[in-house]
């Protein structure tokens, strides 16, 4: 009798583990080396134009992957860069489109 209970419990555990493994999502996110490269390129490009900035890269969930602050960048720029990157990710669009939609609120509703 006890062996039958263990056999049934084992079968149920196997069935649940198979069902659970098929329902797991697999996502790909930006690797840290690419996030670092993107943020470095952004800071360097702005430095060439005489701008001292911070650059943030977030993953698809909005979690910070890389953040660089130029030597003379203002104290508020790291937080602003992170928030800007998070906002773009949450809207699923590039930041330049977010800026255009802020400047022209009707454009967001028209899809421009």
Image: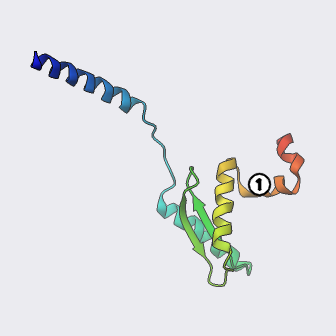
Which residue: 23% across, 21% down? 11
Which residue: 65% across, 59% down? 85
* Secondary element at image label 1: helix
The spot of residue 61 in percent (x, y) is 56, 50
Q: Indicate the quadrant where residue 49 lies.
A: bottom right
> Can you say whether 1 is above or below 73 in the image?
above
Q: Indicate the quadrant where residue 48 lies.
A: bottom right
Q: Indicate the quadrant where residue 20 lies.
A: top left
Which residue: 54% across, 65% down? 66
* Foreground pick, 41 / 59: 59
From the image, which quarter does the N terminus lie in? top left
* Residue beneath disc 1: 98
The spot of residue 78 in percent (x, y) is 63, 72
> Can you say whether 12 is above or below 43 in the image?
above
> Can you say whether 23 is above or below 63 in the image?
above
Question: Residue 109 vs residue 55: left or right?
Answer: right
From the image, which quarter does the C terminus lie in? top right
Q: How many marks?
A: 1
> Can you say whether 44 is above or below 98 in the image?
below
Q: Residues within 10 Å of mark 1 (few under 14, many from 20)?
A: some
* Foreground pick, 73 / 49: 73
Question: Residue 25 vs residue 83: left or right?
Answer: left
Looking at the image, which residue sits at the far bottom? 72
The spot of residue 46 in percent (x, y) is 70, 74
Question: Residue 39 vs residue 76: left or right?
Answer: left
């Amino acid at each position: 009798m006890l062996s039958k209970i263990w056999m049934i419990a084992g079968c149920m555990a196997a069935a649940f583990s198979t069902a659970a493994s098929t329902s797991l999502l697999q996502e790909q996110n930006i690797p840290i080396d690419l996030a670092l490269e993107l943020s470095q390129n952004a800071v360097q490009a702005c430095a060439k134009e005489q701008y001292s900035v911070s650059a943030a890269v977030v993953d698809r969930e909005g979690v910070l992957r890389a953040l660089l602050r130029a030597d003379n960048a203002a104290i508020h720029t790291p937080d602003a860069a992170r928030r800007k990157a998070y906002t773009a990710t949450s809207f699923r669009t590039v930041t330049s489109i977010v800026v255009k939609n802020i400047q022209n609120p009707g454009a967001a509703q028209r899809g421009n």
